[in-house]
Image: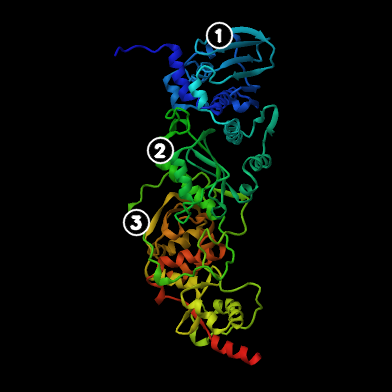
C-alpha cells in the first residue's frame, strides 16, 4: 500500500467526524466562538432539530473582511499563536477546526461586522470543495452563522441522526449548560419559529438563582446549598444538593473548569466521594459547580470534544473538591421522626469500624488557607428535615406530641448522665403507659431511638434510657479511634487564652485521636478521629473548647463534643454507635425506668 498525504477535502471530512457528531455539536462549537468573541447576547435559531437550519447570532467583536476566508480554513484561529499558548488556555476554542469541519458537511454562510468596519461582509462555503465566496451584506455589529442542510453531502452520517425531537433535546440541554456557565450573557433559543428559552443576563446572586431555578428546577433549589471556598490558586463555588434529596435521576450535574463545560472523571469521583460512603449507589448527586484554577495547572488539550481535562496536581484538586463539598453537605443534615415498623439497630450484629491513616504518616502542611477558618460559606437553601431512608435512621420510640409527666427513673440506677436522661425520659414513660406489656417486645431486639441523643433498650425485663454521648465518649476514651488525615489541613486563628487552653489539653487531645498543631496563635488541624472527618470542623471547634474546664477528663471532653454534634445534627447516633459496638456493652450510661410500676398504675387508673 502506498503512503499518501490526504487531500484537504478528505482531511476536513475526517475532522468533521470528530467535531460534528450531531447538530448539538455544531451549536456548541459556534456558540463557544461567540463567547470567545465577547458576546453578551446570543440567539440560537433551530429548524427541524438542526438538520435543516442552525443559525447563531451574537453581538461579539466580529471578523474583518480580510479574515473571513481565512476563518473558514483548517487550523486557522485567533486564540493561540505559539506553543507556549497551549500552557495557559482560557478561551473555549483553540484548535481552528470547527468552521472548516462544519462547512465541509453543510452549506455555511458567515456574516460579520466589526465595530471598526463600516459595512458587513459575508462568506459562503458549501460542501467538500469549500470554495469561499465573499460579498457585501447588511448586518449589525457582531456575527451570524447559518448552517443549512447539515450532512447533505454525507448521507451515511445523516442516517444516524435521531428524530427531530431528540436532536433538539440535545441542543436544549447544551444551551442549559452554556447558560449556567455564563450568567452575564443573554440567551434566546427558538425551534421552528417558537421561542423555547429566553434568559436575561444575570449580574447579582438573586438573578443568578432565578436562572438556576428556571434551568434546574424548584426541587434542586429547595434542597441546594451554596458553597464557595478558596485554597492556594484554586477557587470552587456553586450549588450542591443535599444527599437526602438526591434521586435516581439527577435534575442537574453541571461542572465547569475555568468556564469550560466538563464531564471529567476525576471531578465526578470527587463530588460523589464528598457525599460519603453511606450515599446509595442507586442515587445520583446533583450539583452546579465552578472550579477556577491557574490555567498553567490544567491541560485542556486531551479530548477531541474538550469534555475532559488533565490536572497537573490531580490529587490536590480532587482532595480540595472533596473537602469543601463534604463540609458543605454536612450542613444539610437534619432529622425527622420515622415509623415504628422500620428495622431497629442491634449492637451485636454490627462490626466495629476500622481506622484509615495514622498521624505519624502526615505529609507536610500545605500553604495556609486564605481565609482561615472561614474559607467556606454555606447559605441559602438549607433544608429543615432529612429523609430517614437516606441515613438508615432507626425507629423512634417516642412522639413529641405526648404529654410531659414526672420521670420514673430509678434512683438506684443513677449514672453521671442520670439528670439529663430523667429530663428526656418523660415521653418514653408516657409512651409505655399507652402500651400493653407485649408491645415492649420490639425494644428487646436492640436499640430504639428516642432522638439523636437518646436511645431505649430492654435488658432482663428492665427498660433503660441510654445517653448516647456519655456512653460513646466513655468507650472512646477507653479505646481511642485511630486518626485520619484531613484532605487539606485547616487553620484557625486563636486568642491568647484559647491557645493556652489548647496547650493545656494537648496530651488528652492526642490520646483521643486529634492531631493539632498550635503555633503563633494559629491552630492547624491536621488529623481527626474518622467519625469527625466530614463534620464542619471550623464551626464546632470553637464551640467545643468553650465547654472545657481545667480538671476535665478525656471522657468528659469527648462527651461535650459528641453532645454538641448529636444535638446540632452533623453527627448521627445510629452511625456513631456501630464504631464502638465491641466495647459499648460495658460503657452504657443508662437510667432504668420501672415500667412495671407504670403498668400497675395504669391498671389502677383504669
* Circles 3, 2 touching at the beta carbon (< 8 Å): no
Q: In this view, does 397 lie above or below 288?
A: below
Q: Which mark is residue 313?
A: 2
Q: Residue 358 carries which label?
A: 3
Residue 415 percent location from the top left of the image = 48, 80
For the C terminus, give its image quadrant: bottom right
The residues tagged by marks 3 and 2 sit, at their Cα atoms, a distance apart of 23 Å
* Circles 2, 1 touching at the beta carbon (< 8 Å): no
Of helix, strand and loop, which one carries label 1? loop
Q: In this view, does 84 lie above or below 118?
A: below
Q: Residue at x 63, y 18 (%)?
A: 143
Q: Residue at x 38, y 58 (%)?
A: 483
Q: State the residue position of label 1.
A: 132
Q: In this view, does 426 lie to the left or right of 312?
A: right
Q: Which of marks 1 and 3 is nearer the N terminus?
A: 1
Q: Is residue 91 left or right of residue 45?
A: left
Q: Looking at the image, which is closer to me, 401 or 169?
A: 169
Query: How many labels were placed on the picture?
Result: 3
Residue 327 percent location from the top left of the image = 51, 52
Report the residue that reaches farthest toward the left: 1
Of helix, strand and loop, which one carries label 2? loop
The residues tagged by marks 1 and 3 sit, at their Cα atoms, a distance apart of 67 Å
Q: Looking at the image, which is closer to me, 56 or 585?
A: 56
Q: Which of marks 3 and 2 is nearer the N terminus?
A: 2
Q: Looking at the image, which is closer to me, 391 or 329?
A: 391
Q: Residue at x 46, y 38 (%)?
A: 264
Amino acid at each position: 500500500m502506498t503512503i499518501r498525504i490526504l487531500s484537504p477535502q478528505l482531511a476536513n471530512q475526517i475532522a468533521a467526524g470528530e467535531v460534528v457528531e450531531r447538530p448539538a455539536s455544531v451549536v456548541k462549537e459556534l456558540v463557544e466562538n461567540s463567547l470567545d468573541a465577547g458576546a453578551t447576547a446570543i440567539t440560537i435559531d433551530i429548524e427541524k432539530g438542526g438538520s435543516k437550519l442552525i443559525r447563531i447570532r451574537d453581538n461579539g467583536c466580529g471578523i474583518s473582511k480580510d479574515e473571513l476566508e481565512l476563518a473558514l480554513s483548517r487550523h486557522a484561529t485567533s486564540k493561540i499563536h505559539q506553543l507556549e499558548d497551549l500552557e495557559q488556555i482560557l478561551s473555549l476554542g483553540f484548535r481552528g477546526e470547527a468552521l472548516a469541519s462544519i462547512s465541509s458537511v453543510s452549506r455555511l454562510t458567515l456574516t460579520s461586522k466589526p465595530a471598526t468596519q463600516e459595512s458587513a461582509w459575508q462568506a459562503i462555503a458549501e460542501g467538500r470543495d469549500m470554495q469561499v465566496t465573499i460579498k457585501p451584506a447588511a448586518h449589525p455589529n457582531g456575527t451570524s452563522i447559518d448552517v443549512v442542510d447539515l450532512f447533505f453531502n454525507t448521507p451515511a452520517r445523516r442516517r444516524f441522526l435521531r428524530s427531530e425531537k431528540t436532536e433538539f433535546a440535545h441542543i436544549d440541554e447544551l444551551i442549559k449548560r452554556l447558560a449556567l456557565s455564563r450568567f452575564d450573557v443573554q440567551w434566546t433559543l427558538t425551534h421552528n419559529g417558537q421561542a423555547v428559552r429566553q434568559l436575561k443576563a444575570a449580574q447579582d446572586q438573586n438573578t443568578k438563582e432565578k436562572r438556576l431555578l428556571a434551568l434546574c428546577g424548584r426541587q434542586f433549589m429547595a434542597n441546594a446549598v451554596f458553597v464557595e471556598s478558596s485554597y492556594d490558586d484554586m477557587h470552587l463555588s456553586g450549588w450542591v444538593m443535599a444527599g437526602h434529596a438526591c434521586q435516581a435521576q439527577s435534575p442537574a450535574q453541571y461542572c465547569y473548569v475555568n468556564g469550560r463545560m466538563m464531564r471529567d472523571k476525576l471531578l465526578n469521583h470527587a463530588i460523589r466521594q464528598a457525599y460519603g460512603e453511606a450515599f446509595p449507589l442507586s442515587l445520583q448527586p446533583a450539583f452546579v459547580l465552578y472550579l477556577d484554577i491557574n490555567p498553567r495547572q490544567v491541560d485542556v488539550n486531551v479530548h477531541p470534544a474538550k469534555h475532559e481535562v488533565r490536572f497537573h496536581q490531580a490529587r490536590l484538586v480532587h482532595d480540595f473538591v472533596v473537602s469543601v463539598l463534604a463540609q458543605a453537605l454536612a450542613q444539610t443534615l437534619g432529622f425527622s421522626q420515622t415509623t415504628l415498623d422500620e428495622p431497629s439497630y442491634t449492637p451485636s450484629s454490627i462490626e466495629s469500624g476500622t481506622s484509615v491513616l495514622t498521624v505519624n504518616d502526615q505529609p507536610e502542611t500545605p500553604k495556609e488557607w486564605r481565609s482561615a477558618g472561614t474559607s467556606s460559606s454555606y447559605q441559602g437553601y438549607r433544608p429543615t428535615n432529612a429523609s430517614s431512608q437516606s441515613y438508615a435512621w432507626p425507629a423512634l420510640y417516642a412522639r413529641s406530641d405526648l404529654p410531659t409527666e414526672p420521670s420514673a427513673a430509678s434512683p438506684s440506677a443513677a449514672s453521671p448522665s442520670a439528670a439529663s436522661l430523667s429530663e428526656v425520659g418523660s415521653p418514653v414513660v408516657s409512651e409505655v403507659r399507652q402500651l400493653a406489656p407485649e408491645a415492649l417486645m420490639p425494644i428487646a431486639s436492640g436499640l430504639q431511638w428516642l432522638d439523636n441523643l437518646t436511645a431505649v433498650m430492654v435488658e432482663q425485663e428492665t427498660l433503660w434510657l441510654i445517653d448516647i454521648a456519655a456512653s460513646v465518649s466513655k468507650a472512646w476514651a477507653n479505646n481511642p479511634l485511630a486518626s485520619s488525615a484531613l484532605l487539606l489541613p485547616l487553620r484557625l486563628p486563636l486568642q491568647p487564652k484559647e491557645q493556652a487552653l489548647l496547650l493545656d489539653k494537648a496530651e488528652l487531645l492526642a490520646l483521643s485521636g486529634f492531631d493539632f498543631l498550635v503555633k503563633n496563635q494559629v491552630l492547624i488541624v491536621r488529623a481527626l478521629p474518622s467519625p469527625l472527618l466530614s463534620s464542619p470542623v471550623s464551626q464546632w471547634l470553637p464551640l467545643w473548647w468553650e465547654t472545657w474546664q481545667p480538671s476535665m477528663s478525656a471522657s468528659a471532653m469527648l462527651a461535650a463534643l459528641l453532645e454538641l454534634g448529636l444535638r446540632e445534627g452533623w453527627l448521627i447516633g445510629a452511625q456513631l454507635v456501630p464504631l464502638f459496638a465491641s466495647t459499648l456493652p460495658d460503657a452504657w450510661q443508662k437510667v432504668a425506668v420501672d415500667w412495671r410500676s407504670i403498668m400497675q398504675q395504669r391498671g389502677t387508673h383504669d
